[in-house]
Image: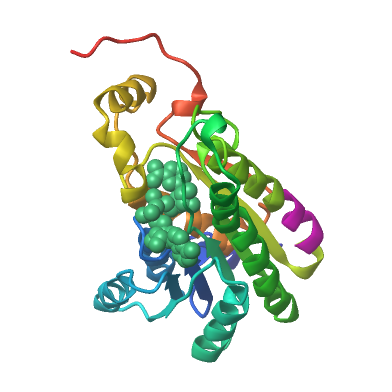
Amino acid sequence: MTFDANAIRALAPGTLCSLDGRVAVVTGAAGGIGRWLAAGLGAAGARVVLTDLEGTPLDEVRDALADARIDSASLPADLGSADAPERIVGGALERFGRIDILVNCAAVNRRMPILEMDPDTWDFVTGIDLKAPYFLSQAAAREMRGAGGGAIVNVSSINFTYGLEHISVYGPAKAGLSQLTRVMALEWADDGIRANAIAPGYMSTPLAAPIWAHPDRSRWILNRVPMKRPGLPAELAGLCVLLASDAGSFITGQTFIADGGFMAGGRWFTPDS
Ligand SMILES: NC(=O)c1ccc[n+]([C@@H]2O[C@H](COP(=O)([O-])OP(=O)(O)OC[C@H]3O[C@@H](n4cnc5c(N)ncnc54)[C@H](O)[C@@H]3O)[C@@H](O)[C@H]2O)c1
């Protein structure tokens, strides 16, 4: 690449991060984080397929995106169904004719001690958090490779590496998702497909609402997060656009932590003021 005016102008964020002409699929798009990731991709120029469970406010999200002049389509599907990957990828192709970006954001959690865990709950959590992204990515990659490539962004969690009591299935599933991200990167690099993951810390969303509602737990978190506040879902959109766009063209196989400094290390206990 020549170091000239054209190459330098192409580094402007509006060009480097542009998703014009690209089609993104976002799972969990009616949820606290998914809707903001969909919005971020749409604001960067992508057309977006919004998928989530039937009965979730997908149409509200679609209408809000339309108000911001973002073209999107809602596609209800249960990721626990074996035919979900085919339905979602087929629906994206039918609506927008291609698929360039897949964001695996949907997840479920059940907090209980290992001694109380039962096989059905284990299957339920790992089914949505690990098996579903595995097979949806497989279906999406089959399309992407024939069209010159794409980008997969998996939404992991700091629990992929940080153990928390009573999170004995979700955490290992997220660890699996981050490991799967590495293998996708290895197997699909020749196809022009990059795979990365975002590992949020403690965010302000419905999934995390029970933690924030618990006085001791919220106090514990705020004492350990150097930024002393929950993350806002909108604060993950920039990282998602980076990983989905040409701005991240040499990045693959990684999990990026966005946590207000939680994983940087321990702080001395600070009594509440
Ligand atoms: N909120 C946090 O503090 C936090 C922290 C770390 C990681 N995360 C991760 O961020 C992602 C989004 O979490 P969130 O906070 O937005 O949660 P959320 O509960 O608001 O959103 C999750 C979405 O997934 C959907 N979903 C659940 N089961 C489904 C199924 N069977 N089929 C289709 N869709 C299904 C839900 O309907 C929901 O809209 C998850 O992967 C979660 O693990 C969240």
In what quadrant of the picture does the N terminus appear? bottom right
Let me know if residue 4 appears in the view.
Answer: no
Q: Which stretch is magenta?
A: 182-188
Dividing the image into four equal quarters, which quarter contains ligand 1? bottom left
Between 108 and 15, the residue placed more toward the observer is 108
Q: In this view, does 239 lie to the left or right of 194?
A: left
* Image height of 125 relative to 7, above or below: above
Inspect the magenta stretch and tell me whether residue 197 lies in it: no
User: Can you give x and y, in whole percent of width and height, for residue 201 in the image?
Assistant: 44, 37
In what quadrant of the picture does the C terminus appear? top left
Between 125 and 6, the residue placed more toward the observer is 125
* Image height of 234 relative to 25, above or below: above
What residue is shown at x 38% (from left), y 25% (from top)? 225
Inspect the magenta stretch and tell me whether residue 185 lies in it: yes
Q: Choose top left, top right, bottom left or bottom right for residue 224.
A: top left
User: Can you give x and y, in whole percent of width and height, for residue 137 in the image?
Assistant: 65, 66
User: Can you give x and y, in whole percent of width and height, for residue 115 in the image?
Assistant: 56, 30
Q: Choose top left, top right, bottom left or bottom right for residue 30.
A: bottom left
What residue is shown at x 62% (from left), y 54% (from top)? 130
Let me know if residue 260 appears in the view.
Answer: yes
Between 93 and 148, the residue placed more toward the observer is 93
Between 184 and 119, the residue placed more toward the observer is 119
Which residue is the extreme one toward the left? 273
What residue is shown at x 68% (from left), y 52% (from top)? 181
Count of picture labels: 0
* Image height of 228 relative to 232, above or below: above
Q: In this view, does 157 lie to the left or right of 70?
A: right
Q: Which colour scheme is used?
A: rainbow
* Image height of 194 relative to 216, above or below: below
Magenta stretch secondary structure, dominant = helix
Q: Choose top left, top right, bottom left or bottom right for residue 161.
A: top right
